[in-house]
């Protein structure tokens, strides 16, 4: 039956998880629409980046559009290839002589984010990002670009590669956590329902066996008395026949009851029906003889309990001892049985085990589920939870079956339980928090390592600016000392090679200055050439990088 139930559950889950034919058709269409929308947004951002050009060539308009049209859908199956393709657009943009920045850095950030969300490729995503950065640096070296291009390559492009990937990786971990948590919750719920049902069935079988023990004994006595009455000489023939029929009917009822209980009993049940059950004192004596530290405390006048209630008291103590031996070996167990106002309360407490406090209620504890079924069927209530580092089981039942049910058991001193799922959820949240922190800590560390160099470069660029009014006021033939006050604090140390190699008078030494303080755009360069401390020429040279 267990195998059949498991097969039925798996079949039902497959049927529930299998998408309907209409959903199979709608899913590719929805994916295509999303990819088309993303492509349109990225292509529009690229066109906006080219709007500052007077007449962009057809290649600049068509090639990026085609690359994005292939990279967006490819990012679902080959995210690394999509990142490489879009990074190529950014690398090509470094050849722009006016500015290294281009709008395709946005597309690059989107592709790296999608690579993080969708799990990357077979290669290590970090190797993919490192390879992209190596390509960008190689392009800068081949084109012999200026410092602004180098600064853009070592700051902006790594941020577009690394930060979105880390955020996407965090999103992927969070989605996996949520999806796995729901799957685990469904699995645990199914397992809990199955184990609880099994425990209830087993306990009902035990209850049926206990009913046979008590009711069968009474019926046997009735049959015995009927047999003795059959031999009485004072009975008439008709009375004697009635007594014989009564004894026969009672014997048949006892046999039918025995057969019913035998069929209901699980294979694991030991002992035939009618076997004498030991008392709680005998059970604790056996436990103490096996090395367990046990203590029994009875209070109140012991009433005449019904057979089912007495058996339930025994089962509560027995299951509690079993759980203490299994989950808290070495702990001391105290059993307290009290009788008051027509009810019996059994409280079994085990102390903190030598190995440390208990983690909580063990999931799928069929014994406790069975106890709760038995006690509830008798009109009682059962509570089981951690207590002062150990564990406590409390059951309260009426002394007679059919009496007024007792109130629920909620001891005030009992600690609230903490389920296994709560601990797992806490650990998963800590892991997700660490990944979320890494998504910001790593870029922050990269930024801290780059910021000093960026600040120094900004200082060099801003402190080498010669204002156009001062440049116009300087006249050739003047001595350097006459206009030294108009010059900035230092010369521009990174003029392009085309500016350095521009023609000049032989035997002169030249100084270079930036024409304005714009740090990202390329600006014109002022050149002042001296001969023996006298200004012999001043020139305005374009500051674009040399592509030769």
Image (cartoon, rainbow, N blue to C red):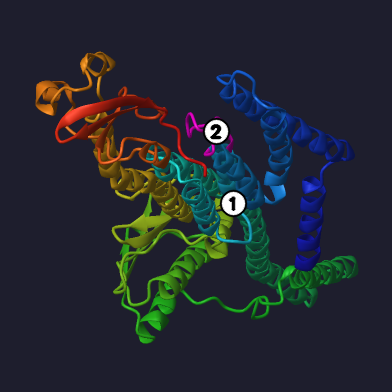
Which residue sits furthest front? Answer: 506
Left or right, residue 407 beside residue 470:
right
**Picture coordinates of residue 171 (x, y %)?**
53, 43
**Picture coordinates of residue 397 (x, y %)?**
48, 52
**Picture coordinates of residue 519 (x, y %)?**
35, 29
Residue drawn at x 61%, y 49% as measured from the top left: 84
Left or right, residue 327 beside residue 487:
right
Asked where in the image residue 357 lies, by quadrant, the reply is bottom left
Distance, label 2 to label 1, CA atoms, is 32 Å
Q: Which residue is mark 1?
A: 180
Cβ atoms at labels 2 and 1 below 8 Å apart = no
Q: Kindly identify which numbered label has been placed on residue 493.
A: none
Asked where in the image residue 65 lies, by quadrant, the reply is top right
Residue drawn at x 22%, y 18% as measured from the top left: 475
- Asked if the stretch drawn in magenta spans residue 191, the answer is no
In the image, residue 237 sits, relative to residue 398, either above or below, namely below
- Asked if the stretch drawn in magenta spans residue 99, the answer is yes
Is residue 504 in sight in this rendering?
A: yes
Q: Kindly identify which numbered label has been placed on residue 106.
A: 2
The magenta stretch is 94-107
Of labels 2 and 1, the one closer to you? 2
In the image, residue 322 sits, relative to residue 412, either above or below, namely below
**Picture coordinates of residue 192 (x, y %)?**
61, 55
Left or right, residue 233 beside residue 207:
right
Which residue sits furthest left? Answer: 481
Which of the two labelled residues, at mark 2 and mark 1, occupies the earlier sequence position? 2
Question: Neighbour class for label 1 at 10 Å: few (<14), some, many (≥20)?
Answer: few
Give whichever of 108, 136 is nearer the camera.
136
In the image, residue 311 sits, relative to residue 191, either above or below, namely below
Asked where in the image residue 394 lies, by quadrant, the reply is bottom left
Q: Secondary structure at mark 2?
A: helix
Give whichever of 59, 261 is nearer the camera.
59
């Amino acid at each position: 039956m267990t195998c059949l139930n498991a097969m039925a559950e798996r079949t039902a889950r497959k049927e529930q998880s299998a998408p309907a034919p209409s959903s199979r058709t709608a899913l590719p269409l929805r994916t295509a629409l999303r990819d088309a929308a993303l492509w349109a947004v990225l292509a529009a951002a690229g066109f906006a980046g080219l709007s500052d050009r007077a007449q962009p060539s057809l290649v600049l308009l068509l090639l990026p559009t085609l690359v994005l049209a292939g990279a967006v859908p490819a990012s679902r199956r080959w995210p690394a290839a999509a990142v490489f393709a879009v990074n190529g657009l950014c690398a090509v943009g470094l050849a722009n002589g006016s500015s290294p920045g281009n709008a395709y850095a946005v597309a690059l950030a989107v592709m790296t984010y999608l690579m993080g969300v969708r799990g990357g490729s077979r290669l290590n995503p970090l190797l993919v990002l490192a390879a992209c950065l190596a390509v960008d640096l190689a392009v800068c070296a081949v084109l012999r670009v200026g410092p602004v291009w180098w600064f853009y390559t070592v700051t902006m492009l790594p941020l577009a590669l690394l930060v979105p990937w880390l955020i996407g990786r965090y999103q992927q971990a969070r989605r996996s956590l949520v999806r796995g948590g729901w799957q685990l919750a469904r699995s645990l719920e199914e397992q809990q329902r199955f184990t609880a049902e099994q425990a209830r069935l087993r306990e009902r079988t035990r209850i049926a066996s206990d009913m046979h023990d008590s009711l069968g004994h009474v019926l046997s006595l009735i049959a015995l008395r009927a047999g003795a009455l059959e031999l009485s000489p004072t009975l008439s023939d008709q009375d004697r026949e009635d007594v014989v029929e009564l004894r026969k009917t009672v014997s048949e009822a006892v046999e039918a009851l025995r057969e019913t209980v035998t069929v209901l009993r699980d294979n694991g049940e030991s002992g035939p029906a009618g076997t004498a059950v030991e008392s709680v004192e005998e059970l604790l004596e056996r436990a103490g003889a096996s090395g367990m530290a046990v203590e029994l405390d009875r209070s109140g006048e012991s009433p005449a309990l019904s057979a089912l209630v007495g058996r339930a008291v025994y089962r509560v103590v027995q299951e509690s001892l079993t759980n203490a031996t299994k989950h808290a070996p070495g702990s001391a167990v105290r059993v307290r049985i009290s009788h008051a106002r027509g009810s019996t309360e059994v409280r079994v407490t085990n102390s903190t085990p030598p190995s440390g406090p208990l983690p909580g209620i063990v999931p799928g504890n069929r014994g406790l589920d069975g106890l709760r079924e038995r006690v509830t069927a008798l009109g009682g209530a059962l509570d089981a939870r951690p207590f002062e580092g150990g564990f406590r089981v409390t059951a309260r039942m009426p002394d007679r079956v059919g009496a007024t049910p007792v109130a629920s058991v909620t001891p005030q001193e009992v600690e609230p339980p903490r389920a296994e799922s709560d601990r797992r959820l806490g650990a998963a949240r800590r892991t997700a928090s660490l990944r979320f922190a890494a998504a910001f800590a790593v870029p922050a560390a990269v930024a801290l390592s780059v910021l000093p160099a960026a600040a120094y470069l900004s200082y060099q660029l801003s402190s080498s600016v010669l204002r156009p009014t001062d440049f116009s006021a300087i006249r050739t033939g003047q001595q350097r000392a006459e206009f030294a006050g108009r010059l900035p604090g230092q010369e521009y140390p990174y003029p392009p090679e085309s500016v350095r190699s521009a023609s000049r008078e032989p035997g002169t030494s030249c100084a270079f200055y930036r024409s304005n303080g714009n740090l990202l755009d390329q600006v014109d360069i002022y050149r002042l050439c001296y001969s023996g401390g006298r200004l012999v020429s001043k020139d305005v040279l374009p500051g674009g990088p040399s592509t030769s």
